[in-house]
Image: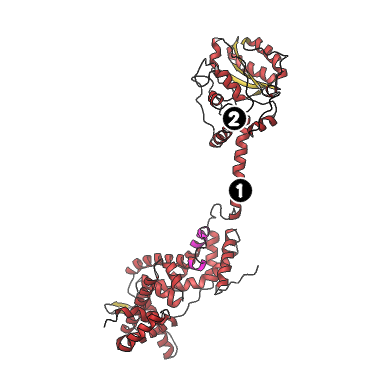
Amino acid sequence: MTRSNDPKPGLGEEGDDGELVAACRNGDPDAFGVLVRRHQKTMLNLVYRMVGDFEEACEVVQDTFLAAHRGLAGFRGEARFSTWLAAIALNQARNRLVRLKSRRRNEAFSLDAPIATAQGPVFPDPPSQAPGPLELLERQALRTRVEGCVQALPAAFREVLVLRDLQERTYEEICVLLKVREGTVKSRLSRAREGVRDCLKHARGGL
Amino acid sequence: MSCRPYRELISGLLDGALTPAERERLQEHLGQCPACRESLEELRLTLERIKALGPVEPPPWLAEKILARVRAQPPVAGRRLLPLALRPVLLAACLLLVCLTGYRLMRVSGPPSSQAATAQPAPPVAPPPVLTAGQTPFTPPPPGRRRAAKDLATLPPVASFTPEEPPQAPGAGTLGVQGQAGAPSKTLVLGSRAGVPAAPSAARSQALGMRAEEDGAAARTARALAFRLAPRDPQRARAQVEVALRGAGATLLTAPTPDRAVLSARVPSAALPALLRQLETLGTLQGPRPDPAAPMAEEVVVVLAW
């Protein structure tokens, strides 16, 4: 049986996922490895945009797959495997955020971190050690600002923005994932985009 | 004019998620509202910025680390060792095994109770009786066994048991079941519960609810004979009785208790006269003396008290 380790978008992927899940349940030691390699990137991006820290995100992704492996027996195929997995990842990310929030409260002030003000976060000058042309520096600065503004959103709005604008999931899937109605998804998405816009407008460098 | 109702529509427009009617309504508003047109452009730019973030690549070690942690997990009971598809089959096999074992145990178990004999004419199985008052309390059979007995109780009656008259001596009362000393039915109880058929195939037929043939039914059905022994040497009576029974090729059905003993055994009919003669050497034996000319089953159940 040949199995692709790369993510395969489209319906065929889900068909393969179902077979792999069944193989895992029947004790196939390789099947779960294929699932991990197929979905790790999507899960990492989802978690990274939620948590905002790459190393933390890697740990959350590990925990996500461990939880999924333990819970495979309870996966009944009512949702797609990727949706089920994303729901686990979101839960793990939320839990990690709670812990990080309390930890960061006690951390020393970071020169690179955005400064929270009444008008939104203000970003200090980007690190000067990055070499390269000015354009690259400015692009990196803009990227940092956008990331900071996404991170500055409340989690309930951030997760909708990440799922829709970065992961390009459908409204229906987001409804299933978050267990909210479509009207709620649209409302949160609108407010999340406006939040990032307002944040960027107030940050140094502007929109 | 309030722009609030159009905020979500602007976001929806960027997604291409508007219905034609919503789109038309928004376009009409945008034509009249410069602030919303500006907002639309700002949000379009914001969305570009967000999408430009792009994906991050997982580190090469991530998958291996995940799988190493998965392998280090303790296996969940029953998941890896037992494939899901096989579980119902194995469960059914276990249940069948339990039922068969219970049925076999019931067939070789001790004599039945008076309740079983009177209320249910011939259930082939029942819990072992408490033979005398004040002795070991009744121990209910395991659930599987009780259930089997209940099922079998619904079967049609089998060939009836014809007991010998119990000995009329006062001591015969020790054969009472559950403290009902002296009840005339007690010997009947013991015998009917024993109900040992002459051949295993007959028992199987009875258990399956098949009607026993009328002719020769008495000959195929075991009889129970109750005796009371007043031993000359009470201290050694138990051992002597056991030796005598074993010498006659008997199969012990219940073990004697230390103080007052009641013992039942299946004895080949041919060995019965010799057994009775040997028991008479141990003391005074009260009980029926079967007629050698009468038709007998291959085995009889002897219930002996002393």
**Position of the C terminus of chain B by quadrant:** top right
Dominant secondary structure of the residues highlighted in magenta in the image? helix
What segment is highlighted magenta in the picture? A67-83
Magenta highlight on residue A74: yes
> Between tags 2 and 1, which lies in front?
2
Q: With B110 as the anchor, is A120 left or right in this view?
A: left
> Circle 1 sits on which residue?
B90
Q: Give the residue displayed 68% in from the left and 14% down from the top.
A: B290
Question: Which subunit holds the residue at mark 2?
Answer: B
A160 and B167: which is toward the camera = B167
Q: Residues within 10 Å of mark 1 (few under 14, many from 20)?
A: few
Please tell me whether residue A84 is drawn above or below residue B256 in the rendered image. below
Question: Which subunit holds the residue at mark 1?
Answer: B
**Which quadrant of the view contains residue A7?**
bottom right
What colour scheme governs how the chains and residues are painted in the rendered image of this protein? Answer: secondary structure
Q: Three-letter amino acid code at disc 2? A: Val
A141 and B221: which is toward the camera = B221
* Residue A54 showing in the rendered view: no
Give me the C-alpha separation between circle 2 and circle 1. Answer: 28 Å
Query: Circle 2 sits in a helix, a strand or a loop, which is it?
Result: loop
